[in-house]
Structures are given as C-alpha cells and as structure tokens.
Amino acid sequence: MVILFGCAQQVTEPSPLSGETRQIIEIKAVDQILNHHYQAFWAEEEFSELLADKAGFKNDFIAKFNKNLAKHNLEAQNFEFSFDQTSHSTVAKCKIYGAISKSGNNCRARFEWFLNPLGLDFISNDFKKSQRVLSWEGDIGSISTTINLEFPSPINHCHAHVW
C-alpha cells in the first residue's frame, strides 16, 4: 500500500472578479523561486474603473494574493503591475518564495496554494504535460482561463505537486 501525504485536493469554488472576461496565468520555476505572471482581460466599463483607482487595485490584489499564500506559509515579493488600455488588461507579476524545496539534485514544488482556490488539480482536470511544462485551458466560473507552468528540467506530478 502506498500513501501519499499532502496530495489530497481541497475543493474550493472559484470566485471570479466582476467584469473579468479572460485570464492567462504563467508560472516559471527558476532555482527555488516561482515567477508568477497573471494577465486579466476586463470588460471596458470595469477596466475604466480599475484605471481610475490603480493604487486601490494593486493594494487589493496584493492583499488577497498574500492572504492566500500565508495560509500555505509562502511569501510573494517584487510585485509589478501594468495596465494596457488597448487590450483592457492588467498584468500582475511577482516572485513566490517557499513553494519549492530542494534536497540534493531533487526539487519538489507545491501548487495547492494556486490550484485549490481555482477548484483545479493537475490530474482530475487533465493538465497537459510535456517534458518541462504543465498546461490547461478551460473555464473557471465564466472566465476563459489559460494556465502554463514551466520548469527548468523534466517533470512528473501528482494532484498538486511537481517534482
């Protein structure tokens, strides 16, 4: 009998932000850091409201993001934001620390902090696996979502971990 600890999925209903129509999430592992890139596309009216209060949007995003990470003893730093008026999109970038552990030449990355709030897991939601990438496309709530996770070397995975 094999027992895998830490791989059980906690199902959480996603809560899309009002007016968000599409999102692209890219996470790249570099050494023991996850570079997180989140692009959200908005309806025109909601995007105009975001432009009117950029500081409020940034502060709210950072607070919600860090609150979720803190539940998993993780930390995000170096936040950067941009607002593209042509595509009505926002981009939030940061570096996440504590999600990758290393022992000798072996690394293990935890993604429950990312997957659980979206109601996803790598196996049940058929993430596509190539040698160094896990990817998924689908709808979360009513939001069209593209997810790409990239790693520096060949990978394997369970429900919420990559090694």
Image (cartoon, rainbow, N blue to C red):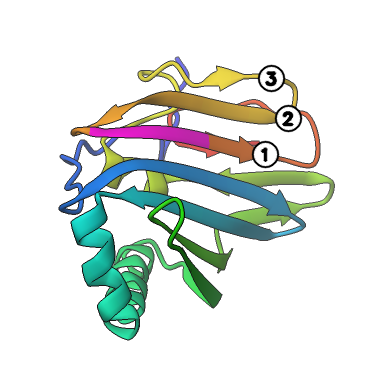
Q: Which residue is mark 3?
A: 130
Q: Do tag 1 and tag 2 residues touch (Cβ < 8 Å)?
A: yes
The residue depicted at 25 percent of the width and 54 percent of the height is: 44
- Element marked by disc 2: loop
Relative to 22, say whether 59 is above or below.
below
> Which quadrant of the figure has residue 90?
bottom left
Q: Please give left or right for residue 13 compared with residue 37 in the image.
A: left
Q: Work out whether residue 107 can be spotted.
A: yes
Q: Position of residue 2 (x, y in %)?
A: 47, 20
> Which quadrant of the figure has residue 126?
top left
144 drawn magenta: yes
Q: Amino acid at mark 2?
A: Arg
Region rendered in magenta:
143-147
Q: Which residue is mark 2?
A: 132
Q: Which residue is mark 1?
A: 150
Q: CA distance from mark 3 to mark 2?
A: 6 Å
Q: Tell me which numbered mark, 1 or 2, is placed earlier along the sequence.
A: 2
The residue depicted at 54 percent of the width and 64 percent of the height is: 93
Q: Tell me which numbered mark, 3 or 1, is placed earlier along the sequence.
A: 3
